[in-house]
Image (tube, helix red, strand yellow):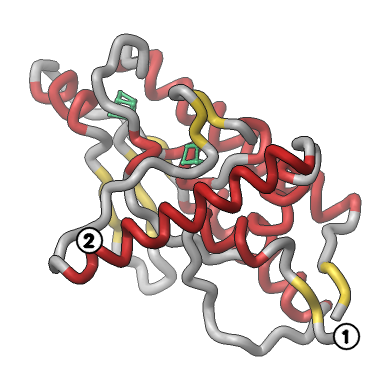
Amino acid sequence: MREMGLSRRQQLELEDIYAGLEKAYSQVADELQFSCRGCPDNCCDSYFLHHSYVEWIYLWHGLSELPSRQQQELRQRADCYLSECGRAAERGERPQVMCPLNESGLCLVYQHRLLVCRTHGVPARMRRPDGQVLHFPGCFRCQEIVAARNGGVPEVDRTALLSRLARLERDLRQQHRLEVPRLRLTIAEMLLQGPPRSLL
Ligand code: SF4
Ligand code: SF4
């Protein structure tokens, strides 16, 4: 099994999607005068599953730049993370465990962090293929700002950018003839499993 990679075109497309999301995020954050500065919380302990090989590969672009000793430490942290998540699940709770890639409040792979890490915070909307529009209110601090505000609520429209990501993922899956079901992995699992591998 060989390690899956992104072509230059695929990588540029992913980076352009991320840049588009960050630009849209900044516009809404500026309009709401919102930032994470001074927040007592750290969203890197939120439990998220991730669904794309494209992002898994790109995350590993960042991880592989870290010294091998640090990668080893991160694997140990990822193990602890999954054990804690398992204990929370046994108690019937949604896990709230700090991401193994967070070091003293900062992301060790900031340039390579995943889409969810780049979008949480400000209000957003997304139109599903069936036409239904989903609204995301943003984090608790942003919701407080919105509640105290007169007038409309600006939102990041994720629809076009997420469609591009879905197309990119579809291309990659076709290229590697991946017929497995949709991924459902935490960052810790992506770390422990190493970069994704193709059967081709
Ligand atoms: S997104 Fe919101 S809750 Fe999370 S760190 Fe930023 S301000 Fe705090
Ligand atoms: S990858 Fe980075 S930004 Fe995302 S949850 Fe982990 S530490 Fe936070």
Q: Residue at label 1?
A: 200
Q: Earlier in the sequence, mark 1 or mark 2?
A: 2
Q: Nearer the viewer, residue 17 or 45?
A: 45
Q: Residue at label 2?
A: 88
Q: Residue at x 23, y 25 (%)?
A: 142
Q: Residue at x 32, y 56 (%)?
A: 84
The spot of residue 3 in percent (x, y) is 84, 68
Question: Distance of mark 1 from mark 2, alpha carbons?
Answer: 38 Å
Q: How many marks?
A: 2
Question: Is the residue 58 above or below the residue 52 in the image?
Answer: above
Residue count near mark 1 (Cα–Cα under 10 Å), binned few <14, some 14–19, many ≥20: few
Report the quarter where the C terminus lies: bottom right
The spot of residue 50 in percent (x, y) is 49, 60
Q: Name the element at disc 1.
A: loop
Q: Name the element at disc 2.
A: helix
Q: Are marks 1 and 2 in contact (CB under 8 Å)?
A: no
Question: Is the residue 43 above or below the residue 94 in the image?
Answer: above
Question: Is the residue 11 above or below the residue 32 in the image?
Answer: below
State which quadrant residue 180 falls in. bottom right
Q: Give the residue furthest to the bottom.
A: 179
Give the amino acid at mark 1.
Answer: Leu
Give the amino acid at mark 2.
Answer: Ala
The spot of residue 146 in percent (x, y) is 17, 24
Q: Residue at x 32, y 16 (%)?
A: 34
Q: Nearer the viewer, residue 109 or 90?
A: 90
